[in-house]
Structure formats: C-alpha cells, structure tokens
C-alpha cells in the first residue's frame, strides 16, 4: 500500500477533514474526541504526523488478492498455469493471490474454486 504519494496525500486530506468535524457543534455536543494512539508522537498534529499514523496503522478491509500473478514468464509472474511457483519444485500457490485483479464479491468461493483446481491437478499428476 501507499506506493504512490498521492494516495497518502488523499488520506491525509480525508483525516484532516474528519478532524475538522470535531470542531462542529454536533460533535462538541457529544464530546467527540480523537483517539490517541502511541505512535508517531515525535510530531505535533501536522500533515507529517498524520502521514506517519496513516502509514503505520492503515489496513485494507477488502480481501487482498492478485499478489502472486499467474503466467508463463517467470520474470513477470509468480506461478505457472498449474499453480507451481516458478523456479521451485513441488511448491504451489493455491489461493486467490493468483488472480490478476480482485473480484467484486467475497473471495471464499473463488478460493475454493482454485483449491479444487489444484486438487485436480495434483491428483492427475499422482495418477488418480
């Protein structure tokens, strides 16, 4: 995450806007306060401090996938079409990290699909 500085800058702007809401009457009425986290304390509340917090605490709520691309060229891809890791014997990746992009729904069913395919490939190799 955050390979592009623009992504971090966008989140900093979002956090700054959210923090400005704490100054509204509605939020003051309910005593809304910022949760203090014990990281990046060497900064005052500046863009630099917010960036530090974002870089250290941000996480995705999506199911990450597509991190071990499947393809024939070992210089560009992690696994081949039989899910074998290029350059290794008997090592396979059997999850949705082989997908080129994320699906729009939950990854449970696609993960099962990949596992079933891997089981078929391995059974065939073993002569079942």
Image (spheres, rainbow, N blue to C red):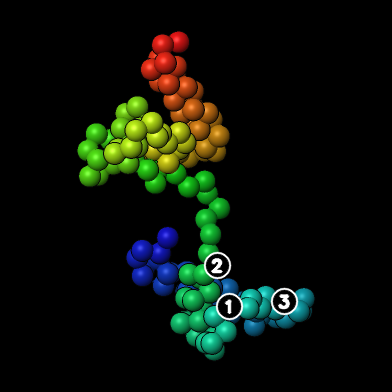
Question: How far is the residue under mark 3 from the one under mark 2?
Answer: 21 Å
Question: How far is the residue under mark 1 from the one under mark 3?
Answer: 21 Å
Secondary structure found at label 1: loop
Of the residues tagged 3 and 2, which is closer to the observer? 2
In the picture of the structure, the residue carrying the numbered disc 3 is: 32
Viewer-closest of 90 and 11: 90
The answer to whether the residue labelled 3 contacts the one labelled 2, judged by CB atoms less than 8 Å apart, is no
Residue 101 appears in the rendering: no
**Quarter of the rendering occupied by the N terminus:** bottom left
The residue located at (47%, 36%) in the rendering is: 95
In this picture, residue 29 sits left or right of residue 45? right
How busy is the neighbourhood of tag 1: few (under 14 within 10 Å), some, or many (20 plus)?
A: few
Residue found at the very far front of the displayed protein: 89
Which tag, 1 or 2, sits closer to the chain's start? 1
In the image, which disc is placed on residue 57? 2
Number of marks present in the image shown = 3
The answer to whether the residue labelled 1 contacts the one labelled 2, judged by CB atoms less than 8 Å apart, is yes
In this picture, residue 18 sits left or right of residue 30? left
**Quarter of the rendering occupied by the C terminus:** top left
The residue located at (22%, 38%) in the rendering is: 73
Secondary structure found at label 2: helix
How busy is the neighbourhood of tag 2: few (under 14 within 10 Å), some, or many (20 plus)?
A: few
In the image, which disc is placed on residue 21? none
In the picture of the structure, the residue carrying the numbered disc 1 is: 39
In this picture, residue 40 sits left or right of residue 124? right
Res 89 → quadrant:
top left
């Amino acid at each position: 995450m955050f390979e592009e500085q623009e992504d971090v800058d966008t989140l900093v702007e979002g956090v700054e806007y959210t923090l400005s809401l704490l100054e509204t009457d509605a939020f003051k009425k309910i005593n809304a306060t910022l949760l203090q986290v014990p990281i990046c304390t060497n900064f005052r509340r500046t863009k630099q401090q917010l960036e530090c917090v974002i870089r250290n605490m941000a996480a995705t709520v999506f199911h990450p996938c597509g991190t071990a691309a499947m393809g024939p060229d070992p210089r560009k891809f992690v696994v081949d079409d039989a899910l074998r890791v290029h350059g290794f014997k008997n090592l396979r990746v059997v999850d949705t990290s082989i997908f080129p992009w994320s699906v729009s729904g939950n990854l449970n069913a696609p993960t099962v699909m990949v596992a079933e395919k891997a089981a078929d490939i391995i059974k065939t190799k073993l002569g079942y």
